[in-house]
Amino acid sequence: MISKKVRELFVSLMEATDDSPVAYDKETEQYYGVFNNVVVDKYIALGAIELVEGTSGASSILLNNRDDFLSSFTAGAREAKNGSDQSYADYNANPFAFSVGFEHFHQVAKKKRPPSGYICHGFERDDTGLVHLQ
């Protein structure tokens, strides 16, 4: 099980849009926002992310091996939706990202009323019926 703070960091990256607290710049592939510095520092040390610029407030970070992370996160959400278990994580390029996507799907599904207009990488959009991809 992934801790709530860790899941919040990576989910905030997957939810990044122009209207969300975390923004994503397609040209630089950087995420910009206010992040939990303890979690960011831990995942910098583990090599999952890189700090591009940080101040006492907002920071810019890069997600290392972003393509693998995105595809594995999507696979985790898809398998959770299909009722599978997390054993499929072993077959992904990034088992951690698979688990984050898997757990996040279950967190969203627990809510009595799914959020209307919710946008997250790997999740089906209400307005188009298509899976949102960053």
Image (cartoon, rainbow, N blue to C red):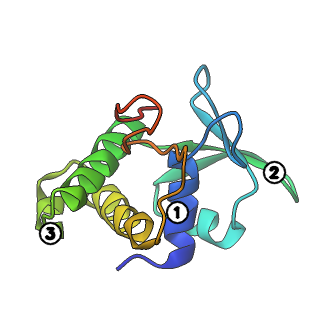
Amino acid at pointer 2: Ala
What residue is shown at x 46% (from left), y 63% (from top)?
46
Residue 43's disc is 1
Residue placed under numbered mark 2 in the picture = 58
Residue 85's disc is 3
Amino acid at pointer 1: Tyr
- Disc 3 element: loop
Q: CA distance from mark 3 to mark 1?
A: 25 Å
Amino acid at pointer 3: Asp
Report if the CB atoms under discs 1 and 2 are less than 8 Å apart. no
Q: Residues within 10 Å of mark 1 (few under 14, many from 20)?
A: some
Q: CA distance from mark 3 to mark 2?
A: 36 Å
Q: Nearer the viewer, residue 44 or 71?
A: 71
Picture coordinates of residue 69 (x, y %)? 36, 46
What residue is shown at x 60% (from left), y 42% (from top)?
16
Residue 29's disc is none
Q: Of marks 3 and 2, which one's residue comes earlier in the chain?
A: 2
Q: Of marks 3 and 1, which one's residue comes earlier in the chain?
A: 1
Measured along the vertical axis of the image, is residue 92 above or below residue 7? Answer: above
**Residue at the extreme front of the image, as rendered:** 113
Q: Nearer the viewer, residue 55 or 26?
A: 26
Quarter that holds the N terminus = bottom left
- Disc 1 element: helix
What residue is shown at x 57% (from left), y 74% (from top)?
5
Picture coordinates of residue 48 (x, y %)? 46, 54
